[in-house]
Image: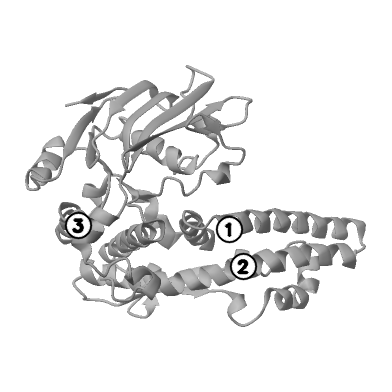
Amino acid sequence: MYENFSFKYRHLLIWGDYNLLYLTPMLAIQSLRFEHFKNYSQGAISLCPQVNCFVGKNGAGKTNVLDAVYYLSFTKSFLNGADQQHIQQNNADYFFIEGSFNRNELEESVRIAVQRGAKKSVRVNNNEHKKLSDHIGLYPLVMIAPNDIMLIHEGSEERRKFMDGFIAQFDKIYLADLLSYNRVLEQRNKQLKLFAEQQCMDSTLLQTYNEQLIRYGTSIFLKRKEFMEQFIPVFCSFYATISNGNETVDLQYETDMHTQSMDELLRLTERNDLAAQRTTKGIHKDELVFTLNGQPLKKFGSQGQQKSFIISLKLAQYEYLKQQTLTKPLLLLDDIFEKLDEHRLNTLLSMIAHGDFGQLFITDTHLQRLQEVFQKMPLVAVKYFVVDNGSINEI
């Protein structure tokens, strides 16, 4: 599976997967506590360093537990929405989430607090981050959830978010450049609207914005290009495993910057930008194209093929992130057993049994199904929790 990695990744693997398991630093949450988060007044659980299963009826709050873990990594909900929307309704004006992490036998604490009318607080070992972006990448995480299918069916913005969020977990400069680009883009768009309203154009001011977009946009493009060149072979390898090699898939990174520089794009589209009152070309228009046997996946892929594509994408994300961070990320599997057929499920379970992943969090509606699965893996440590409308109890 690793034959397509560039040298700087392959040198980590020359001793084989067995030794890599012991060379890769361990990251795990030892305990999780939260108050007034979504449908929970409070919750406190001690976690297993390997597999944690959360069982309950639909709507009981299983996914909310995973979202609390996601918050500790990304400082936001994977379901998006404003932070204050996740405060328990009619019961409080704040929520907080606390996690006690173990990284190579060293304990680290993370606390995220949101209060109505106040700035969100993110603390690591009681030290507050001045910028939320400082936290991204400290606790790498990959989540596989039912709404991942939107990567296929929604617009290009969803796929750019996937790519950007992924790269940001291991490249701080990329994240800083992306934030700066988006800030300047917003300012330039506002200025273009003012030009239209005032019926005059300040070329010097526009050039100032252009210079910044060129600087940040070029850096972002080069890193996206390098990333995709390295990531695509890893993804294709996972898909071949999951699909038994029955189809060929591809990811294509489409951008105007393959043929024109950012400087050329802005110069050639200046008149269009003034007319449209927005920046019509740039890396904010980049696209990821998903194909199956050379055809658009959205149109020609069956439901099963689309599921295989998404699972492969996320497993490749996990593997690539593991190599980049030299840490096994946390892996969250939301309602995964309901979404996979027997072959894809067995492939995933085989990876779990062979220690390919670090700490796992899994939700399901059937306790017996989970127990039957992990009874076949005697070397895997598992904890089970029953979730029932605001309460979590270990079995």
- Tell me residue 219's x, y (percent): 62, 67
- The residue that appears at 35% across and 29% down in the rendered structure is 32
- The residue that appears at 33% across and 76% down in the rendered structure is 4
Task: Left or right? Give the position of 68 relative to 182.
Answer: left
Amino acid bearing label 3: Met
Residue 351, numbered circle = 3
Single out the residue that lies furthest toward the top. Answer: 91
Q: What is the distance, in whole Å, between disc 2 and disc 3 at their CAs? A: 36 Å
The reply to whether callout 2 and callout 1 are in contact (CB within 8 Å) is yes
- How many marks can you see? 3
User: Can residue 9 be seen at all in this image of the molecule?
Assistant: yes
Residue 219, numbered circle = 2
- Tell me residue 370's x, y (percent): 15, 41
Residue 185, numbered circle = none
- The residue that appears at 50% across and 47% down in the rendered structure is 136
Amino acid bearing label 1: Ile
Q: What is the distance, in whole Å, between disc 3 and disc 1 at their CAs? A: 32 Å
Q: Mark 1 sits on what residue?
A: 173
Task: Left or right? Give the position of 346 relative to 11.
Answer: left
Determine which quarter of the picture holds residue 250: bottom left
